[in-house]
Image (cartoon, rainbow, N blue to C red):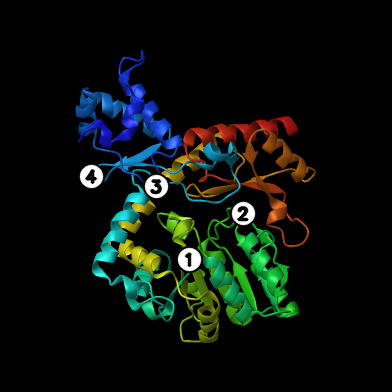
Amino acid sequence: MTIRHIPWLRHAPKGGGEPIYLALAQALETAIRTGELQPGDQLPPQRTVAALMGVDLTTVTRAYGVARSRGLVDGAVGRGTFVRPLAVEDEAGLVDLSMNLPPQPRGLSVAACLRETTAEVLRRTDAATLMAYHPGLGALGQRAAGAAWLAPVLGDVAPERVQVCPGAQAALSALVWSLVGRGGTLVVEPLTYPGMLAIADQLGVRLIACPTDTDGLAPDALAAICREERPAALYVIPTMQNPTGITMPLARRQAIAQVAKDQDLWIIEDDPYSRLMAEPAAGLATLAPERSFHIATLSKCLAPGLRLAFLVAPDGGRGAPAVEAVRSLAGMPAPLMAAVVASWIRDGTAEALLAGVRAEAAARRALAAARLPAAQGSPEAIHVWLPLPIDWSPVRLRAAAKARGLALVSAEAFAVGPIAAHGVRISLGAPGRQEVLAEALAGVAALLAVET
């Protein structure tokens, strides 16, 4: 192999007056910024670069280390070093604290895992069969993998109850259409997932906000709403609630499940975040299994691009019509992606990626705690809720943040009716590097100091 086979090395001539390791790091950055190296590309082994450049191995190790500290590459022992995707702030000049993404897993390359597993899937599966239409929502083996993935939250679940869906939004839309219907009533938290607001608006569903406290939904208030309004279902995010970050304790979950049983209320449990916790609380679907639909997307704990979610239907078959609606409206999951995810769960890759996301999320949550002590949320969360005084203008705050190069999202984006609590949700995963996030959080703190 020669330098001709590794074109980016030409950007690092020796004798330029700066240390060779910095010249190599700058050559990498130049190749990445110009598109010569693409996200997911694997870099050559350090020994190969050292031999071609006529330098010692330590020099190349330092160069790769500098590139890693700049957020340009990622890697792990035994897997190699890979080009990372450009972060939003690198491409647009704006630090995004509004989009709720999991951070890149520490010590692992998602691109490398995808490349290896996709190749393995294609080796053992006929491509024409894989790319054809597939009936139902996932093969039995994929459902079994979903049941294994959800076991820390739901315990033992029969694979037949698990459906593999092309993302949570499609499944949520189908469930609301089937269980609630046009003109029907759905109970939600006062601040809730904007995607559900959009679904309700499109389907003509009436939303009723149930009061909450520091433990989540108030059971007595929910019971009163059920008696007076006769809603068809409850939509709730009991773990690391979006946007407030509240996690319902077990006693509150039990009380909510009991109200649902007493009032014959369906439960739509949206659970994007439980697997981020080392010891997640029991899902509502374990407390009221005969009336709960549990939806767990992989978008918030592994990667949004997987476009996959697991739906666990009620025990006993009562939810069969709603499951049929999901099959009709959501359609099949992408067969290749479903096969990749199932392989990851079976061979441990999914857990390794999750561990990397957890480690990075915990470090970022610690940064938020240090710079914004008033922020609320789990130590393992990928977002926090920052309460604001009632007289603050969210429009003015967002404008001031944008002037500092920060994108924020405030309470009105989540509100059902009049805003019950003012604040901003700060997402911690989108910035590509911790240093960028730390600076952005310091900018938010500075904004608060000016306003107060």
Task: State the CA–CA distance, disc 1 to disc 3.
Answer: 19 Å
Residue extending furthest toward the top: 17
| Residue 142 in picture, x, y percent from top left | 35, 72
- 366 is higher (above) or lower (below) than 250: above
Q: Amino acid at mark 4?
A: Gly
In this rendering, the answer to whether 313 lies above or below 309 is: below
Labels 4 and 2: the sequence-earlier one: 4
Q: Which residue in the structure is indicated by mark 2?
A: 243
**Given contact means CB atoms under 8 Å apart, are the residues at marks 3 and 4 in contact?**
no
Circle 3: residue type = Pro
Instruction: Say if mark 1 contacts mark 4, CB within 8 Å.
Output: no
SS at mark 1?
strand
Which numbered disc, 1 or 3, marks the residue that appears first in the sequence? 3
Earlier along the polypeptide chain: callout 1 or callout 2? Answer: 2
User: Amino acid under label 1?
Assistant: Ala
Q: For this rendering, which residue is in front, 418 or 348? A: 348
Q: Nearer the viewer, residue 58 or 183?
A: 58
User: Going from the N terminus, do you reach mark 3 or mark 2 first?
Assistant: 3
Report the quarter where the C terminus lies.
top right
Type of the residue with mark 2: Pro
Alpha carbon of mark 1 to alpha carbon of mark 4: how far? 31 Å
On residue 105, the disc is 3
Q: Mark 3 and mark 4: span between their CA atoms?
A: 16 Å
Q: Which residue is mark 4?
A: 78
Residue at mark 1 to residue at mark 2: CA–CA distance: 17 Å
Q: Earlier in the sequence, mark 1 or mark 4?
A: 4
**Gap in Å between the C-alphas at discs 4 and 2?**
38 Å
